[in-house]
Amino acid sequence: MFEKSKTYCFGRYVVDVPLELELIGGTNKYISGSIDSGRGPQKYKELVAKSLEKRKSENYKRGFKYAGSEFEGDNNKRIIVSKADLYSTTAYGIDAYLLVPSTRPGAGTYFYTGGEGFDGKSISQTVEQYKKLMSSLRYRSSNDIPKEAGFCFENGFVAGDGKTQQIESVSLSFTLKKHPDVFVRLSSDVYFRQEKTLLDRSDERYKSFPKEVLAKINTLRSGVRDVNGNKGEESLKIFPSDDGMGKVYGFYWETLGEIGNALKPSVHLEVSTGEVGAGQSIPSTITQKEALALYEAVVKSIRFRSYN
């Protein structure tokens, strides 16, 4: 059961995901905003032009207005700097764009990112940070597991040794083919860490539940579980479905990583069944044995990505 798998890179980690799972989405955040992507040199040009037009428009009375740019004349990258007076202080914004040239893998793919509200006293350092990002960012296919240090996200990779503590977060979501109520979610975060462990948070949550509700929740397994050198905890619970006609499974594993160590981010895994949206559940369409096998196939493979 779940014997064949595909390796995915997320953040600074990798995981082996059973082929029966289908990737349905992902998110990321780097420095201050998500790094989004698209296809087509013409669309890239239009995106940059539209950003410049908006920032320079005389009718753009509110928000961040054009203050300068980097890489003017470069057809493959551009950083637009904007500013606004907010509450008697000047804040800055960044719009950064990169087009993969025709000579490199992923030619025609473009990336765009940025943020607003940067402190005017450190805007020079912020611009340099984004310039470094532009030089370190490249296209990455889902089959490409980089052999160098850096941050993986859907369609892209940012090379870097990870010694700088900064915002880096990523998530991946999967659903089980032919079982749309079954989901697997993985997330990793360098900057934000939970103050309390998975089990401590779980204990606090269930303290507020009525006794008659708690009586219907069974704990299959709960405790410390280290995975491939990552100290962690797991909580595997069985719940009644909303219609009372069956069971649903909620299996979790988490490592908090190490505070202040960008090379030891937090990682959170969730395997859930019976989901139909809006917080509602139906009886799980897979058995407890199958849910456990799916959880084990994923959790045991989570590891820090090795590189040369």
Image (cartoon, rainbow, N blue to C red):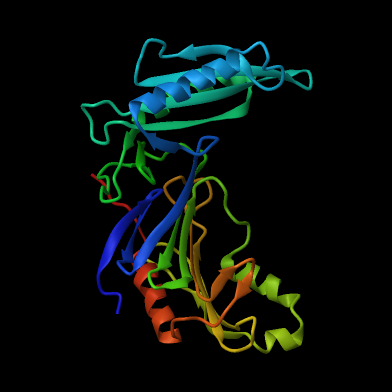
Q: Residue at x 57, y 30 (%)?
A: 115
Q: Is residue 147 visible?
A: yes
Q: Quadrant of the C terminus?
A: top left
The image quadrant that residue 22 belongs to is bottom left
Compared to residue 85, the image places residue 147 above or below, namely below
Q: Quadrant of the N terminus?
A: bottom left
Compared to residue 240, the image places residue 131 above or below, namely above
Whole-percent x, y for residue 157 in the image: 35, 40
Whole-percent x, y for residue 125 in the image: 52, 21
Compared to residue 166, the image places residue 20 above or below, namely below
Residue closer to the observer: 175 or 50: 50
Q: Residue at x 47, y 68 (%)?
A: 183
Whole-percent x, y for residue 130 in the image: 46, 25
Q: Residue at x 68, y 89 (%)?
A: 215
Residue closer to the observer: 80 or 243: 243
Question: Which residue in the rendered view is the most extreme toward the left?
Answer: 103
Q: Residue at x 34, y 26 (%)?
A: 41
Residue closer to the observer: 224 or 1: 1
Q: Is residue 262 left or right of residue 219?
A: left
Whole-percent x, y for residue 39 in the image: 36, 35
